[in-house]
Image (cartoon, helix red, strand yellow):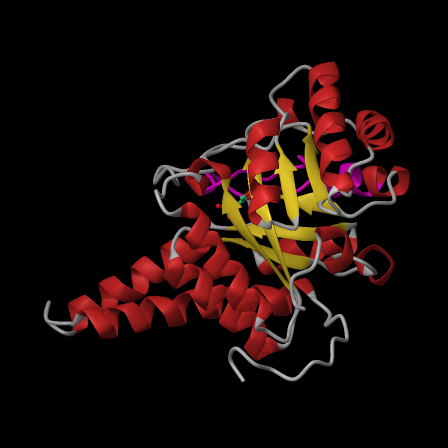
């Protein structure tokens, strides 16, 4: 069985200092491309669905059953995760559909309300064997639609190390998202990650730490983040940008005559490349599963 929890897929990542890529899928092309890239690399992957898009299909039970079916036929381990869960109820519905991890995002709530919400989700999710990620501090920007103008990093949302320590202890979460210089979507200006803050948090918390807003971070920024304690890195915008660029350039070079199948393949390839490149930079390690490939074998 290739479907694993977040806790399992990140097992060993803190001690061995590597990160697992977490990629948001917005449609079947992206799902297929992300899973195929993972299978071809033989590396674990976290496949995420952003809550905003979670319910936008009338056939969503069938849709997610299909996704899980694809995963169950793979060799490499995959965690299926709800990203930026907006409520306790949404997290419960994802668990009911077979997701193996949920993020409950109470990062805009006052501290005590965030703790209470996360505690409730952790209690129910853990009873079902499902992992939970939560966020303390707040990573700004646009989680659902990249603003072409980009966003500036809001220093006021940075995670306070003492608060991260308290939050992890009080909630019992399996992974903790923190803010130390990233934004969702495009960056306005230069990326400047606060490694001292990250290292301080790492020294106080022993669960995997999560970096949201991975698109647009230069390679040395990823390496620095992993070196200082990040274990899960979320990527969405870069796949959308790369797929659009690839299709636009094919359309231009064909004088506007490129066909649907060729454009589809081009986008698929672009998404696969983004996933593979990031897995390499993050130092993602195989978990040592030895079942022969079935789905893409
Ligand atoms: P990007 O769109 O900036 O890659 O961020 C993705 C993310 O953090 C989703 O949770």
Query: Where, by quadrant of the figure, is residue 177 drawn?
Result: top right
Magenta-colored stretch includes residue 44: no
- Residue at 72%, 72% (x, y): give it: 286
Quadrant where the N terminus lies? bottom right
Horizontal and vertical percent position of residue 94? 57, 42
Residue 133 vertical placement versus 70 (above, below):
above
- Say which of 76 and 281 sits in front: 76
Does residue 98 appear in the picture of this structure? yes
Q: Residue at x 37, y 47 (%)?
A: 59
Count of numbered circles on the image: 0
206 lies left or right of 114:
right
Residue 105 lies in quadrant: top right
Looking at the image, residue 3 lies above or below residue 207: below
Q: Quadrant of the C terminus?
A: bottom right
Q: Locate residue 65, reporting x and y percent.
A: 49, 56
In the figure, 10 relative to 277: above or below?
A: above
Q: Quadrant of residue 76?
A: bottom right
Whether residue 195 is in magenta: the answer is yes
Left/right of residue 247 with respect to residue 9 in the rendered view: left
Q: Position of residue 85 (x, y in %)?
A: 57, 34
Q: Is residue 25 visible?
A: no
Tell me where residue 244 appears, x and y as whole percent.
31, 58
Q: Main secondary structure of the magenta part?
A: loop
Q: Name above or below for residue 121 compared with residue 115.
A: below
The reply, left or right, for residue 99 in relation to residue 19 is left
Residue found at x 68% / y 14%: 110
Segment tinted magenta in the rendering: 178-199
């Amino acid at each position: 069985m290739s479907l694993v929890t977040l806790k399992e897929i990140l097992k060993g990542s803190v001690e061995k200092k590597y990160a697992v890529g977490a990629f948001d899928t917005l449609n079947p092309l992206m799902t297929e491309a992300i899973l195929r890239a993972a299978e071809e690399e033989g590396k674990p992957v976290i496949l995420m669905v952003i809550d905003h898009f979670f319910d936008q299909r009338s056939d969503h039970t069938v849709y997610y059953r299909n996704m899980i079916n694809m995963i169950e036929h793979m060799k490499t381990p995959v965690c299926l995760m709800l990203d930026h869960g907006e409520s306790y109820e949404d997290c419960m519905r994802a668990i009911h559909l077979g997701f193996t991890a949920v993020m409950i995002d109470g990062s805009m709530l006052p501290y005590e309300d965030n703790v209470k919400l996360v505690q409730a989700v952790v209690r129910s999710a853990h009873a079902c064997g499902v992992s939970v990620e939560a966020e303390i501090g707040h990573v700004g920007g646009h989680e659902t639609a990249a603003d072409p103008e980009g966003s500036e990093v809001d220093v006021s949302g940075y995670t306070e190390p003492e608060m991260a320590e308290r939050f992890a202890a009080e909630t019992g979460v399996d992974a903790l998202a923190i803010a130390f210089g990233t934004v969702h979507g495009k960056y306005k200006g230069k990326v400047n990650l606060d490694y001292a803050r990250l290292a301080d948090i790492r020294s106080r918390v022993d669960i995997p730490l999560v970096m949201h807003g991975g698109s647009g971070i230069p390679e040395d920024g990823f390496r620095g983040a992993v070196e200082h304690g990040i274990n899960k890195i979320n990527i969405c915008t870069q796949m959308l940008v790369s797929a659009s660029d690839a299709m636009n350039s094919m359309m231009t070079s064909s004088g506007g005559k490129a066909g649907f199948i060729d454009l589809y393949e081009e986008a698929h390839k672009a998404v696969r490349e983004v996933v593979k490149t990031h897995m390499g930079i993050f130092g993602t390690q195989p978990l040592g599963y030895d079942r022969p490939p079935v789905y893409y074998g």
